[in-house]
Image: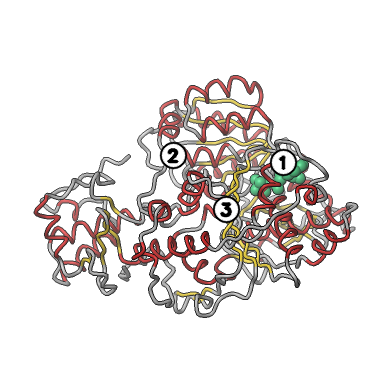
Amino acid sequence: MSGYGFRRDGGEFASDTWRPLDRAVHRWVLAHGGCAALARLAAWASYADGQGDAALPMDPTRHGMAPLSDAELAQVHHDPLVDAGAHDAMRPFVMDTAHFYLRRNHSNECRVAASLDARRNAASSVAIDDGDLDALFDGDRSNAVAPQRAAVRAVVGRRLFVLTGGPGTGKTTTVLRMLAMLQRQAEAPLSIAVSAPTGKAAQRLVDALRRGRQQLLARDLPPAWRAAVDALPDGDALTLHRLLGFDPQRNAFRFHAKRPLTADVVVVDEASMVDLALLRGLLDAVRPDAALVLVGDADQLASVSTGSALMDVVSVLERERDGALVRLRHSFRAERTLVALNETVRTGDAAGFAQAVEAAGERAAHRRVDDTARLATQLRAWSERLAALTALRASPAAEPEALRATALAALDALSQQQLLCALREDVFGAVATNRTIERHLRRAWREPERAEWYAGRAVIVTRNDAASRLFNGDVGVCLADADGRLQVWFETADASGARDVRGFPPGALPPHEPAFAITVHKSQGSEYAHVAVLLPPDPAHRILSRQLLYTAVSRARERVELWSSDAALHAALAQPVERSGRLAERLARLPVADAAPEQPKPVPVVATPRQGELAF
Ligand SMILES: Nc1ncnc2c1ncn2[C@@H]1O[C@H](COP(=O)(O)OP(=O)(O)OP(=O)(O)O)[C@@H](O)[C@H]1O
């Protein structure tokens, strides 16, 4: 995947492979008496951590690092800075089963494995009558719904439960029913916390649960179920950092093993985005007797930071046929042809992908975009379609109901088509393609060439903002009222969970950027009717991976286009992201030594130290 080389003459230090941080690690080791081989290894481990690896394997090595000689390895093993079995937490590096770790990654990995294992073992079985579930599922006992029913049954009595599935497979629908079941089994009203790594995902989950609850209550439910659904609390949308009380001053969480959360049930959606350090913080903070429910699509992109925890946990539970896991496979939402296409991407089946595109007819296309001229052609056609969306240029009336309808129609129009870019920078990235699309739109809509704001402009918020209650990832559309006054409208939900809007003057928005093209990373958790996915044409580009492509194409509900070279498509399909680390191994057969947890203490949660600061 990378062509970087390990140069024994110390050339890595001068090359641009290592980040300044990796070089600082190298210098730190030498300054603290470490041997030269350790300094190089530590810098590579820092580099690997930046790539999402929890550990650097010695055989084979990663990222192009040449293997250490036996003599060098022996030196590293005996270096006082390395813990190679001494269990001395003061040593900043760990060599464990031919994997070299920065101390904090090793500590997080061991702790996460031990906590998950303890939670797995704490399960007790409770018999649930299948007939009783009929009320929650409208009597539906079809194959499509069977795994949802299984999940609702299996969650009872567990301290850890994992629900995974692709988009539209009913994860949220099932979570609501699992909560109702847990409430039904409880003697008193449960304290339930629902959370997600991002504010937008948390808000989406809370809104969907609220809507689902109203729908369930509108049914003719038996009294016992009605009481259980009624008793479910109407929780706030909390990011995981807020739930755990992240204190940026101390870089630690307020809630931890000695001061756990009060919640009886903690649900975490979009769990694929949770990195190792955050998962450790979560596991420390959830009471041992509380139920932790992790929900997400294990095949999507992993966290932007260290580890691929959900993927690792799912792989082990699935292999061991553990009842703590249910995978939902049936999509209730997407077009069947697109579900088949997504599956070929998920499994990296290049021939199958070509056939699925063919079979999907109008619903899927692979457009060969391997240079900037072809990209320009696609962007022009794409912009023309956007420009034709009249809802984006409608003027909201002053009357609240009409205003709401106009703004929602504009937001709906926007979610009809979305360009997703693998890259942010570069001519094939989101920033440049947004610029091109905006240029086309201004021209088509006869707006001044330099106008920053104009009716129809779409923006995405880039930072959570408590004051405006806008979250990183929220998308808004700018509309002009009858007097030409511009307001940017965002979707929200009213107290009953019904769709509503909120408007802001453009100058009052938190940090934001244009949203006609967004990165695939930003699109996680969202879906659109028609998606175009733009990959960089160079097959050697490191961004290309199967998970990236799967995340991107699975955002489409009705239609998907891939804009890429053949080579880039094949490279992405052939390249599953496999993050190095031993979490799955530890979970599968946890050695007793690792199960003895360290003393709980505030955990540094910033996975990658900032420049100039060394924390291993
Ligand atoms: N058992 C079911 N019977 C009928 N429709 C269902 C069922 N489960 C889910 N659905 C419908 O499928 C759609 C997707 O469900 P839901 O939002 O729960 O899925 P999800 O996996 O959470 O989706 P996302 O990809 O947004 O995370 C919804 O419209 C929902 O009403």
- The kind of residue on which mark 1 rests is Val
Eyeballing the image, is 516 above or below 590? above
Eyeballing the image, is 532 above or below 288? above
Circle 3 Cα neighbour tier, 10 Å, few/some/many (<14 / 14–19 / ≥20): many
Answer with the quarter of the image where residue 383 lies. Answer: top right
Left/right of residue 13 with respect to residue 253 in the rendered view: left
- The kind of residue on which mark 2 rests is Ser
Answer with the quarter of the image where residue 27 lies. Answer: bottom left
Q: Position of residue 566 (x, y in %)?
A: 44, 25
Gap in Å between the C-alphas at discs 2 and 3? 29 Å
Which quarter of the figure is the N terminus placed in?
A: top left
* Colour convention of the picture: secondary structure
* Residue located at (69% from left, 37% from top): 529
Q: Which residue is mark 3?
A: 324
Q: Is residue 152 visible?
A: yes
Where residue 545 is drawn, which disc sits there?
A: 2
Eyeballing the image, is 420 above or below 93? above
* Residue located at (79% from left, 46% from top): 137
Q: Which residue is mark 1?
A: 145
Query: Nearer the observer, disc 2 or disc 3?
Result: 3
Q: Position of residue 417 (x, y in %)?
A: 66, 38
